[in-house]
Image (cartoon, grey):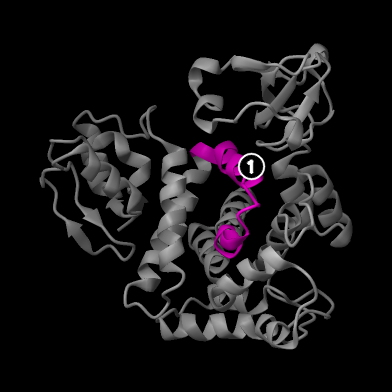
Amino acid sequence: MKLVPILQVGGHIKAGAALPFGVRDAEGKLLLAKGQIVPSEQMREALLNRGVFVDMDELRDASARGADGGVAAGEDFFGRWEGLQTRLSTLLRAPQEPLFLPRVKECAAQLIGWVERFTDQMLFVVVQHDHSRHEVYGLAHLLHTAAVCAVVSRRLGWAPERQRSLVGAALTMNLSIIDLQGRLASRGGKLQPPQRAAINRHPDEAVAWLRNAGLDDAEWLSAVAQHHEQPGGGGYPQGLAEPCETAQLLRLADIFLAKLASRGGRAGLPAPQAAKLLYTGSNGHPFAALLVKEFGMFPPGTLVKLASGETAVAVRRGASGSTPLVSAVMNRHGDPLGAPVRRDSAQAEYAITGLAAPQTLRVKLSPHQLFDRRYEA
């Protein structure tokens, strides 16, 4: 049985209508039978946000009967992202719960399912995250790392089961220090001995918790155990000279996203600078090179100044890493525009001349509006 995340086929599900297929958990167990009525729009949204699955064969049957088969144009990615964050804030703090592992797998599959259709939106929410909310840093960092791992592993052409192992590891690598990370992000400063000890042992603790939850995925467990190991040695907790490939990709995504975040009075780095430091700091590791290429010089969510004098935000990656599609949000005089105006930075009159400081922004960015098809050029 091949399972498909339900969010990819939301157009099939209508409020007040019967389900055209069964709804299943990450293991394929039937949760809701085909033909059951979806009583309201609220129930429909709850179902789509739940991160459950449908059987590919049943989906084909539904498509053959005339359903549209894809994510409808009106599907709200950003609302779903918020819903996933909320779900993980409870889930990742309760690894002892009986359904912990299948629900983590559902969340991992949900992220992987978004990659093909919503890559630019995923990068946007990662880059535009409000890092002043230090108390949620630990949870946000896990979600962002998992999203980036989903994007890069797909670009690498890894098999689906390997992608799931990597993204699952990204979501669970810091299980024992989620709240500690939030406190450290808020305060900053030198680690106290108990805090350092907790940091040093967290890979082993996470592995123990995952094993207790019933995980027997060797690649997932190795990635968690080794995500702070460094090629050639010098990492922790074991000082391995040859960490596994999955752990190396996880470590680099972890480092890159930590550079983007502000913590303890230290401002986060702009994405171009963080990417450069990641590449040089890894001695040009191929995974670092691919991560930098995937993001581009100005990834979605980056504020830029244009040759036109306008201030804009990158929304979609372009033909090259330095020429994204952007939406102008302020004119050359610094006045907010009534609606975003799409610009192609590959055109000389709209070429990017530099980064714009976030504090100069005089308009609130609305991701729903920025990605609205009405503003596509």
Q: Which residues are magenta?
A: 117-140
Which picture quadrant has residue 124? Answer: top right
Q: Badge 1: how crowded within 10 Å, few (<14), some, or many (20+)?
A: some
Q: Residue at x 22, y 28 (%)?
A: 66
Instruction: State the residue position of label 1.
Output: 128
Residue 360: x and y in percent read 76, 30
Relative to 213, say whether 26 is above or below.
above
Nearer-the-camera pick, 336 or 344: 336
- Whether residue 154 sits left or right of residue 86 in the image: it is right
**Going by the image, does 289 lie left or right of 203?**
right
Percent of width and height locating residue 44: 24, 42
The amino acid type, in three-letter code, at marker 1 is Gln
Which residue is rendered at x = 24% and y = 31% of the image?
67
Instruction: Tell me if residue 140 comes above or below residue 213 in the rendering.
Output: above
- SS assignment at label 1: loop
Q: Quadrant of residue 377?
A: top right
